[in-house]
Structure formats: C-alpha cells, structure tokens
Amino acid sequence: METKKINKTIYFLRLEKDEEVINSLKNFFKKERLKSASFYGIGAGKDFIIGYYDLGKKEYLKKKIKKECEILSLIGNISYLKKEIFIHIHIVISDKNFKIFGGHLFSAKVSATLEVFLFLMDKKLTRKLFPDIGLNLITFKKFHQ
C-alpha cells in the first residue's frame, strides 16, 4: 500500500495487487493510531465475499464472487467495537458482462489497484450490539476523545 497524507484530515491510499482490502485498511488505521473515519474508493478486485443482511433471520446471506470485477463504489466507515477496530464496508462491483453485484463486504483482494480517500474524524466512534436488530451499530451515547 502506498499512502499520501493530503492534509490534517484526509489520506489517499492506493492498495496494490493481491492486498486484502479489510485487513489492509485495519493495519493502516492501527499503525497510524487514528480515531475514526469514513472512506470511499474505486478500483478492481477479485475473490469477493459479499452479504445481504436478512433482518428477520438476523443473519447475513453470503455470496462468493471469485472472478475479477471492477469496483464501482466502495464506501464505509471505521469505528471501534470494544477496543477492536471495526471496518464497515458496502460495495458495488461489475463483471466483464456488466452484471452488477452489491452488498456488505466481508472480504476481497485487489486485482489491479484500489484507490481510497479516507476522511478522519476527531472523535472515536464506538459500536454496541443492538439485540433487536442483531447487529453492532454505532452508538452516540459515548464519544471518546
């Protein structure tokens, strides 16, 4: 990964071929000791695992997409669940036949490049389990400096 700090609150990241997206973001965030952030990106990837959350069942339906696809939109945020970094990403991808897939991203590898703009926050966002929904959601009851 190559990184460039644009200003006090924005980084530009370029992930390289075969890097795993979520682990790369998590490692960068940990190394830089950042609080929280939002981000968006575009590029190309492969070996995707995406999901759709079934609220009634309180579980993700998952789909593996092994082929190389364009990453048309990658958007998400970085917060904390307990003391662990929590990466939340949604993605839209297109294959060579222009078929579109989208959902929550569980994993993916970069196939050519992934260009990400990361926007820092000066507060640490935290998550907690909302049992009625079955997900760890951002809560505003407790901000950390």
Image: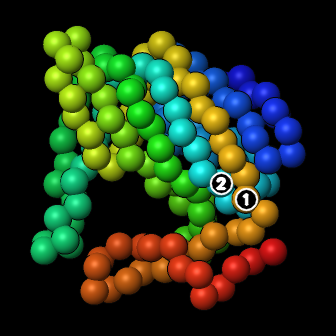
Residue 73 higher or lower than 135, as above or below: above
Secondary structure category for the residue under label 1: strand
Q: Residue 115, how many percent across, how many down?
A: 58, 25
For residue 59, side relative to residue 42 (left or right) = left
Residue count near mark 1 (Cα–Cα under 10 Å), binned few <14, some 14–19, many ≥20: some
| Circles 1 and 2 in contact, beta carbons < 8 Å | yes
| Residue depicted at x 54% and y 80% | 139
For residue 111, side relative to residue 41 (left or right) = left
Under mark 1, the amino acid is Met
For residue 115, side relative to residue 59 (left or right) = right
Q: Residue 23, how many percent across, how many down?
A: 54, 42
Mark closest to the chain's N terminus, 1 or 2: 2
| Residue depicted at x 47% and y 44% | 75
| Residue depicted at x 70% and y 31% | 12
Under mark 2, the amino acid is Ala
Q: Residue 100, how many percent across, how many down?
A: 21, 29
Residue 44 higher or lower than 86, as above or below: above
- In the image, 119 versus 47, the foreground residue is 119
In which quadrant will I find the N terminus? top right
Q: Is residue 30 visible?
A: no
**Which image quadrant for residue 93?**
top left
Secondary structure category for the residue under label 2: strand
Question: For residue 37, which numbered disc appears in the image?
Answer: 2
Question: For residue 8, which numbered disc appears in the image?
Answer: none
Q: Which residue is mark 1?
A: 121
Image mark count: 2
Q: Residue 6, how many percent across, how many down?
A: 81, 33
